[in-house]
Image (cartoon, helix red, strand yellow):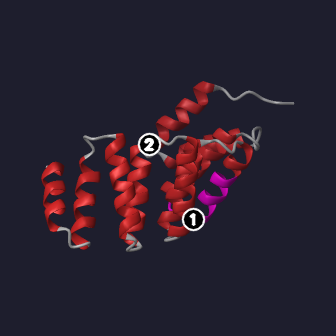
């Protein structure tokens, strides 16, 4: 028997998460999980709650479950990447961000996040590539200009660095 989740309950849970009422959000989510264990949405929601609670291992498991149910679930894929970033696993974070871009290549924020991860790994050419791509996708995204400027500064390309810092302001 497939039980269709009540959209009203899902909306309530999302609102509780936004208000940071994680205890009640988790209780309502667990109630839903009891009848919808194999639902990608509720697994993603449980992952978000656990991520906010800094229960990274649990959040990773919920996001993986959501993706195993729906391999093209963009939100769960980016959330999983962020969970891996929180535990310092840059390799898995990068892999899942790239998977997210394979689902939707037009996400400037995800592209920017890849640039940040490569910058943190000191892979400056890769960082620059993703910051430039982020700017191409959204030429008014100041963070990408700023981080491109930092990358170019670190690469000792001071002229370009100054241009991008100015663009960020």
- In primary-sequence order, the first of circles 1 and 2 is 1
**Residue 95 percent coordinates (x, y):** 57, 60
Q: For the residue labelled by badge 1, is the local secondary structure a helix, a strand or a loop? A: helix
**Residue 69 percent coordinates (x, y):** 73, 44
Q: Quadrant of residue 162?
A: bottom left
Q: For the residue labelled by badge 2, is the local secondary structure a helix, a strand or a loop? A: loop
Give above or below for 17 relative to 162: above
The span from disc 1 to disc 2 (Cα, nearest Å) is 19 Å
**Residue 83 percent coordinates (x, y):** 53, 60
Which label number is shown at residue 107? 2
At x 44% / y 49%, what residue is drawn? 110
Q: Which residue is mark 1?
A: 92
Left or right relative to 123: residue 40: right
SS assignment for the magenta stretch, majority: helix
- Asked if the residue under mark 2 is in contact with the one under mark 1, i.e. CB atoms within 8 Å, the reply is no
At x 67% / y 48%, what residue is drawn? 67
Q: Is residue 55 highlighted in magenta? A: yes
Q: Nearer the viewer, residue 167 or 64?
A: 167
Stretch of the chain drawn in magenta: 53-64
């Amino acid at each position: 028997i497939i039980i269709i989740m009540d959209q009203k309950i899902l909306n309530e849970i999302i609102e509780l998460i936004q208000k940071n009422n994680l205890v009640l959000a988790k209780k309502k989510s667990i109630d839903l999980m009891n009848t919808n264990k194999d639902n990608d949405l509720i697994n993603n929601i449980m992952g978000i709650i656990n991520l906010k609670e800094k229960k990274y291992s649990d959040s990773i498991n919920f996001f993986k479950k959501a993706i195993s149910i729906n391999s093209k679930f963009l939100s769960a894929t980016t959330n999983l990447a962020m969970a891996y970033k929180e535990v310092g696993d840059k390799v898995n974070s990068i892999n899942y961000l790239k998977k997210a871009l394979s689902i939707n290549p037009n996400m400037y924020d995800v592209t920017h996040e890849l640039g940040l991860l490569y910058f943190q790994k000191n892979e400056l050419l890769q960082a620059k590539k993703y910051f430039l791509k982020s700017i191409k996708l959204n030429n008014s995204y100041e963070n990408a200009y700023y981080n491109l400027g930092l990358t170019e500064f670190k690469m000792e390309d001071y002229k370009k660095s100054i241009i991008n810092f100015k663009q960020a302001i």
